[in-house]
Amino acid sequence: MAVVFSCPFTDNLHMDMKHLQTFVLTARTLNFRKAAEQLFLAQPTVTQHIRLLETELRVQLFDRGGKRVRLTPAGERFLQYADQLLHVYEEGVQELTGWQQGYRDRLVLAVSPLVARSTLPRVMNRFTAAHPDVEVVVHIALSPEIPALVTDGRAHLALSRIPAHSRDLYSYVWYNDPVVLVVSADGLDLDAAPPDWREVLANNRLLTHNHPIYWDDLLLSIHRHGVRVRTMEVSLVDITKVFIEEGLGVSFLPISTVRRELLEGRLMEVPTPGLPLPTAATYVIHQAVGPSSTAAEFMQLLVPPQR
């Protein structure tokens, strides 16, 4: 699609959105080959898109000296506007598509993987049943990446495992999730007394850092109890659970993430008397100016989940 702009340096600027997309991706990767691969284009096509855009703008966007590619000062200045143009265009296309499908409104959520797999589905069921004419878009993103999505307007509302630290955003605790020590139930007598948590940690590898907040303090607390542990960092909760079931280790996980496995008898909770365990908070984040009416209706359904 070509867009016509009125600019002081040219009276007839026809800018192709494909050229803008190529420029933005090349600016992010600073590599023509990588940009071509991600765009599923031949590298000469990427080069042609950039040259056509430079010709239309009458500026050089990239410095191609030697093997390295760098943005010129003009390229750096134009990048933020190109990004905004693409965002507005894509948002407009999505809005039009939703309108054609009969939706009256649109709600974009940014959600951490942990929340999306555990507590979000129940809320989504209630919201879509009550608001069938609202198109819901769910962007899955890691918690540290979520605030920027709300700040930039790419999401109306966010559900994150960490709060936002920005004057432009407001965050509050949706619920506090108890953290529990879980082990594989394979071969254990579920009716017998649970094993001692110290022996569990001493005899098994501890799978850590599957949550962005509580692990450093928890490991320090375990160390103060004189328990020596061998650790393995596993960044995703889903993989952590698979590893536990396969006997590769044990872990401390939010109860909402292992509720099904505990009910089905695949994992077992081990009490930790004497070892205070943290809680893992889940946060609602929106812009400080206040959520939209549709986002506010979604927030009304955010009741804390039952343990």
Image: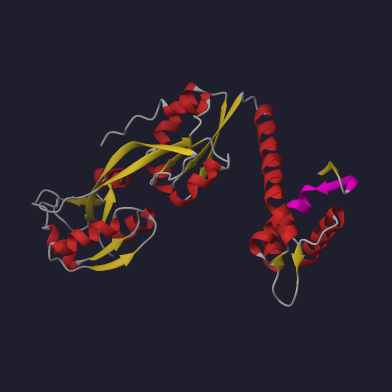
Q: Quadrant of the C terminus?
A: top left
Q: Is residue 300 visible?
A: yes
Figure quadrant of residue 58:
bottom right
Asked if residue 18 lies in the magenta stretch, the reply is: yes
Magenta region: 10-20
Q: In the figure, 204 relative to 121: above or below?
A: below
In the image, farthest residue toward the right:
11
Q: Is residue 42 left or right of residue 228?
A: right
Comparing 263 with 235, the one in front is: 235
Q: Is residue 246 visible?
A: no
Percent across and percent down for residue 22 are: 73, 56
Q: Quadrant of the N terminus?
A: top right
Q: Is residue 256 left or right of residue 70?
A: left
Q: Residue at x 53, y 27 (%)?
A: 292
Percent across and percent down for residue 137 are: 55, 37
Percent across and percent down for residue 14 are: 86, 46
Q: Residue at x 70, y 61 (%)?
A: 26
